[in-house]
Image (tube, rainbow, N blue to C red):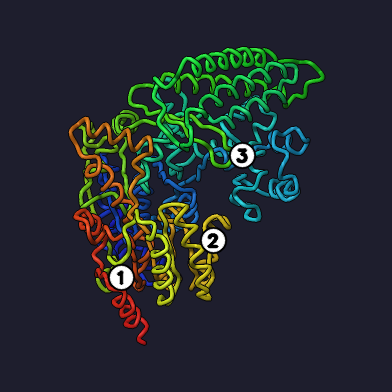
Amino acid sequence: MGSAARDQLGLYGPLPHLVDRYEERAGQLAMADAVERALEEDRILLCEAATGTGKTLAYLVPALLSGRRVVVATASRALQDQIYFKDLPLARQIVDVDVTATLVKGLGNYVCRRRLDLFRDGLAPQPRGREALPLVDDWVEQTDRGDVAELTELAEQHPIWAAITSSSETRLGSRCPHHERCFVTQLKRRAEGSTLLVVNHHLLLADLAIRGEHPARVLPDYDAVIIDEAHKLEDVATSFFGTRVTSRRVDRLLDESQRAAPEDASLCEQARREAQALFGALNLTLGRDDRRPFPHDAWTETTQSRYFALDDVLAALSSRISSRAGSEEPDVAAAVQLDAGVISGRISGLRQALADLAEPEEGQVVFLTREAASQGVALTSRPVHVGPLLGERLFDRGPATILTSASLTAEGRFDFLRGRLGLDEPRELPVDELTLSSPFDHAHQALLYTPIDLPEVDDPAFTPAAAERSCALAAMTPGGVFVLCTSNRSLRALANAFASAELERPLLVQGAAPKAALLSSFRKARDAILVATMSFWEGVDVPGDALRLVVIDRIPFSVPSDPVVAARAEALRADGKSPFKHDALPRAALILKQGYGRLLRRRDDVGVVAILDRRVATRGYGRALVDSLPPARQTRDLEDVQSFWRDVTGT
């Protein structure tokens, strides 16, 4: 290996000549040392690196120098793009090593040429979005990667993307007439020839799930894994290793089945009637609830019989469509013939998913939800604890694994994370821990405002009072404001309050535009107010006076009635542990730390974080939450906030 990563990032390395206003960061160098050791000695490293540490370069530089094939996995596409297009080019300049890298996103991010042909010819299942076809056609002729994020003129949720992007259910592999020109095929070939792969958590888990004695792979073989935004790994794994079937999914699949095999229209209609009967019965069990657990014994004789009836029809339909997949009948379009084989496989997958839900494995919680948009029903299973799965598929397979984030500890310890990820059990690889505090002077740069004069959060008067206080805080703040809500109901109430307050600043509300567009407008305005929910609590970087105040309405506790949360609580009680102490509180601390972390992004930033939930200041556990945050000054007095801004502005 070449020079150590510390030498490349330090005062006498190349980095000071490549960036403006370079400052040697002790935390960055310490992290680079730890990552380098983990890669060299095949160790597991847990590294909490506070905002400002420079953690991305601290793991990219040793990864590039290692000579090993390394997978970098993030929770969000935004961070994937930032690493690949912004941080990686700088890291390459630092190490001056010829390293090939590939950005690998999920299949749904890439245009499928075959599905685009079907859409253009009017054979696609979704007729909406045709007005965008000329724009897409022009772009497809020019793009090398086929990544839909390149076409910024179309919103992420534009209906045409659902009709023309790739998926595991629609890929045909070498049978596709566009196989050699396929964007996904070309992506896989680039990945095979690359030393560094930038992926997301879901892709990493998909690869881990199918690896075994057989040669199946989602990603090429690799020597090490670096998991950024590792505080999200449990949530992504919980979703990934579960099963979900919605009434809308069944309807859509039957519509597509009928297009692929119009000869079997009557069988499709029969399957649709049986599905409606099953989901109608499940809907009745929900009553007025939007979500409730659905244990195995809730499968009554009625629901069981309707499930078996649906399964019988789906089996017959799959067999009939499969028999026609290789048909040479001249009146059947070749593209639809190929689709028949895919559709048959999807029906088989649906049957397996329903079987898994009807007979869930031990450790899975099954629940019903009513879909708000379609008023349909979803039947879902999730593992209560993903630690054993991650242990078996990731930590015990041998490659070096680095998990990093700005929030991995609660009360200064990794105990909660280790327990949830299965790292509290003995592992073959040694596990190291490293906590790197913020290089920022929080005691002078930030003020934590935790009032006690607002109503309790369960009092109907809380939301109006929180809205009024938020407006008062915004009015005295010389810069932009983030208002981070724990529910859509709070978002609507606070957004309405700001609209009525007439503060003469731009008001941006989550949902009114794509996230990237909202953030762009927020940064440009420099005095805007953005009201948002959980998706803006993390992964958002707004330095300078564009963000001077972060308002958090409540402590972000998990909803106790959520079936997965309730199942985890039951498991903890069975072990003689307090669900609040061992799950709810540390989980809230990690999320709260993420929300707080939106404020200070560089050494000259200043600002206020306001947590309007009085429990932070009045309950015993509030001290544990505050102790998990950076050491800012804390006050309960609104006048201290006013004085803070007078000192900052000199007025």
Residue contact at pointers 3 and 1, CB within 8 angstroms: no
- Alpha-carbon neighbours of circle 1 within 10 Å: few (<14), some, or many (≥20)? many
- 457 vs 376, left or right, is left
Look at label 1 and name its amino acid.
Answer: Ala
SS label for mark 3? helix
- Residue highlighted by disc 1: 446
- Residue highlighted by disc 2: 518
Disc 2 from disc 3: Cα separation = 30 Å
Q: Is residue 36 visible?
A: no
Question: Residue 313 location, x and y as percent?
Answer: 61, 14
> Considering only order in the chain, which callout, 1 or 3, is on the residue closer to the N terminus?
3
Q: Who is closer to the viewer here, 184 or 435?
A: 435
- Residue highlighted by disc 3: 183
SS label for mark 1? strand
Q: Is residue 530 visible?
A: yes
- 374 vs 92, left or right, is right
Question: Residue 545 location, x and y as percent?
Answer: 43, 73
Look at label 3 and name its amino acid.
Answer: Phe
- Alpha-carbon neighbours of circle 3 within 10 Å: few (<14), some, or many (≥20)? many
SS label for mark 2? helix
> Considering only order in the chain, which callout, 3 or 2, is on the residue closer to the N terminus?
3
